[in-house]
Amino acid sequence: GESIGGVVTCITRNVPAGLGATVVDKFEAVLANAGVSIPVAKGFESGDSFEGALLTGKEHNGDFYVNPETGATRTRTNRSGGIKGGTMNREN
């Protein structure tokens, strides 16, 4: 038989802000370790990281702002997939 390719998508919701670390055990590193431990996995993307490689840091990193309706701290773009500096920022 012939093999086929595929893509697995995982979305985290309501993860506590600050989960992860800034140097060792970054949240993305833990997820990537689990993902690429699957023998056939060839890549791991968090947020729009493969597309984000074509942007400058200023273009890719969304600024934080306070939502006036909810009072929640949010990011304008969330291109980072809810992870900034290795820790969760409460975005999906």
Image (tube, helix red, strand yellow):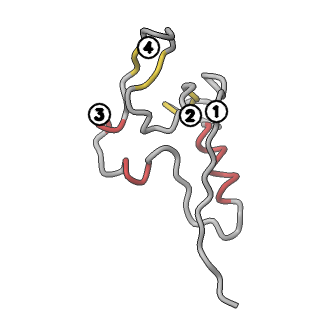
Q: Are marks 2 and 1 in contact (CB under 8 Å)?
A: yes
Disc number at residue 58? 3
Q: Are marks 3 and 4 in contact (CB under 8 Å)?
A: no
Q: Nearer the viewer, residue 72 or 26?
A: 72
Could you say whether the residue bearing mark 2 is in a helix, strand or loop?
Answer: loop
Could you say whether the residue bearing mark 1 is in a helix, strand or loop?
Answer: loop
10 Å neighbourhood of mark 2: few (<14), some, or many (≥20)? Answer: some
Q: Are marks 3 and 2 in contact (CB under 8 Å)?
A: no
10 Å neighbourhood of mark 3: few (<14), some, or many (≥20)? Answer: few
Dot 4 or dot 2: first in sequence order is 4
Name the amino acid, label 3: Lys
Could you say whether the residue bearing mark 4 is in a helix, strand or loop?
Answer: loop
Label count reads: 4
Q: Which residue in the structure is indicated by mark 1?
A: 13
| Residue 34 in the figure: left or right of residue 90 | right
- Disc 3 vs disc 4: which is toward the camera? 4
